[in-house]
Amino acid sequence: MSGHGHGSGSGLNLTLKIWRQKNAGTPGGLVSYQAHGISPDMSFLEMLDIVNEQLAERGEEPVAFDHDCREGICGMCSLVINGNPHGPDSATTTCQLHMRRFKDGDVITIEPWRAKPFPVIRDLVVDRSAFDRIQAKGGFVSVNTGGTPDANATPIAKHEADLSMDAAQCIGCGACVAACKNASAMLFVGAKVSQYLHLPQGQPERYRRVLAMVAQHDAEGFGGCTNYQECEAACPKEISVRVIAEMNRDFLRATLIGTEL
């Protein structure tokens, strides 16, 4: 533990107000902890690692939080930091937020995503399987069996490919839901719909996909979109609300066409 630079002699001294909750059926609350000697070069999750080491040394229960890649790719580091999903920096996941963003003596409040469809598993960890169920309803394309076609055999206009790739950047973290006053996941659903509708491979299920995914979104208990665009502002991958407009357009078309699920 010598390499972490704990101790009060150098680094940042912070007060952390961390949400502690045993499980979804138990009331939770904010608990204050002191973090001393935190290096400005640490990531936010590394800082929490240090706090957990100190808690373990004292025989206290470490804080549960989600993490995996720590490279801004997986979307698991879902924390609301001082009221902002993923913290104060735009286009940044929690794992890529560095402690230099904070000042010595700061009070930092750390909470889980707040949405009924994301029940708390423990402390800062929420169950985001609702996203998996939405994606399972339409996140696939039909492919004829047989030999693998050449990658260049199906021409796709660059503009369309770019729009698809922009939407495909969504990592399913749920920051859009945490930022939305309605706990709407329309940015997530829109991204998954838009990712396919700009590609020829996505056309066979195009209208069934949007109807099925929106229906699952509503069944999970997410709210409706009222165009506040907080989702776009909070998204670490800067997904544009354009994808919601595209989803709404295809949803209307699918409804008029009468496509069956």
Image (cartoon, rainbow, N blue to C red):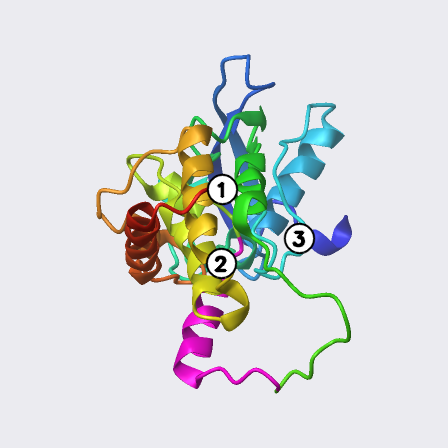
* Figure check: 130 above or below 191: above
Amino acid of disc 1? Leu
Query: Which label lies toward us, 2 or 3?
Result: 2
Q: Position of residue 240 (x, y in %)?
A: 34, 62
- Magenta residues, as a range? 153-171
Query: For residue 5, which numbered disc appears in the image?
Result: 3
Q: Position of residue 130 (x, y in %)?
A: 53, 35
Q: CA distance from mark 2 to mark 3?
A: 35 Å
According to the image, label 1 marks what residue? 79
According to the image, label 2 marks what residue? 170
Q: Answer yes or no: do the residues labelled 3 and 1 have beta carbons within 8 Å?
A: no
Q: CA distance from mark 2 to mark 1?
A: 17 Å
At x 39%, y 58%, the residue is 89
User: Which of marks 1 and 3 precedes in the sequence?
Assistant: 3
- Which of the pair 107/250 is nearer the observer? 250
User: Which of marks 1 and 2 precedes in the sequence?
Assistant: 1
Q: Residues within 10 Å of mark 1 (few under 14, many from 20)?
A: many
Query: Which label lies toward us, 2 or 1?
Result: 2
